Image (cartoon, rainbow, N blue to C red):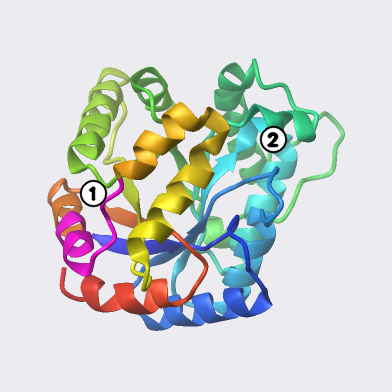
Amino acid sequence: MDVGICLPYSEPGITRSTLLDWCRAIEAGPFGAISCGERISGADAIDMRILLAGAAALTARVRIVPTLYVLPMHDAVRAAKEIASLDLISDGRVDVVVGTGGRPNDYRAVGADFVSRNARLPQQVARMREIWNGGLPFEGSEPIGPRPVNGRLPRILGGFAGPQAIAQSAQWADGLYAFSITGDAGEIRHKFEVFDRAWQEAGREGKPWKIGGFWYSLADDAEATLRHYAYEYLRIAGHRIAQPVADSMTQFTPERVLDTMRTMKATGIDELFMVPGSAHVSKVERLGPLVARL
């Protein structure tokens, strides 16, 4: 099981130095990938594409994985061009997790329709693959470049929470990103069971790529940092949802984080993305020795 880290992208205090420090530490450590989520609204939210393009230029080894690209907020042709360009800059290190997200105000801010997002997503994924394979957006159009590096199309994984959406994604996705906010391996395992059944029922061949993830903190004030991060992230859903989740967070000691990573590994996933609770680079530096012990 490879371990990747999600860059901070919506926390206060992110600067150029943050990106430089994190990329250097991740590239030098026992990590296999860098990821980043997508947010539009939020006073401190930084554009996912810009951060990951910077990470692609600052690293040479680790994979670059948007997690997740809220595809229905964007034009599929434009998204295909962006992802292929990121693949070019990284010399073929890109895979992408796509999903519908859950922030109506982000859709509204960019003029995208929130209601029809689930219906549009599979069509958009197919459109991106057509563009990457040299298809034209309309008759008489010039090709839309660049092409993905070395003829390898980026893997497109689904990123969903509900069982119906997970099962439907097995029709078009190359794998699944099954996330558990609290680090519940049973939750991860259940999501992959749903996906695997749907994959077989769809007659899909080969082995799907499986990614898990959870939130953690190894700061000096790790418990308070993690619970504050969880609350602020989920505040859009209201206090009655955000507060119980924040209170349930437990991944804030080295022993607990290592134990949970080992439990996640036992589920058979290919990769685990760790999402830190703040922007300080110590989250990378303190996680590295634990990853080395897996």
Q: Nearer the viewer, residue 50 or 144?
A: 50
Q: Is residue 209 visible?
A: no
Quadrant for the N terminus in the image: bottom left
Q: Which residues are magenta?
A: 249-260
Q: Is residue 253 visible?
A: yes
Callout 2: SS = helix
Q: Which residue is mark 2?
A: 106
In the rendered structure, which disc, 2 or 1, sits on the residue that comes first in sequence?
A: 2
Q: Residue at x 68, y 47 (%)?
A: 42
- Residue 216 sits in quarter: bottom left
In the image, residue 264 lies at what x, y percent? 19, 51
Q: Nearer the viewer, residue 164 or 103?
A: 103
Give the residue type at disc 1: Ile
Q: Residue at x 84, y 43 (%)?
A: 142
Relative side of 137 to 19, left or right? right
In the image, residue 31 lies at what x, y percent? 35, 71
- Residue 11 within the segment the image draws in magenta: no
Q: Nearer the viewer, residue 5 or 126?
A: 5
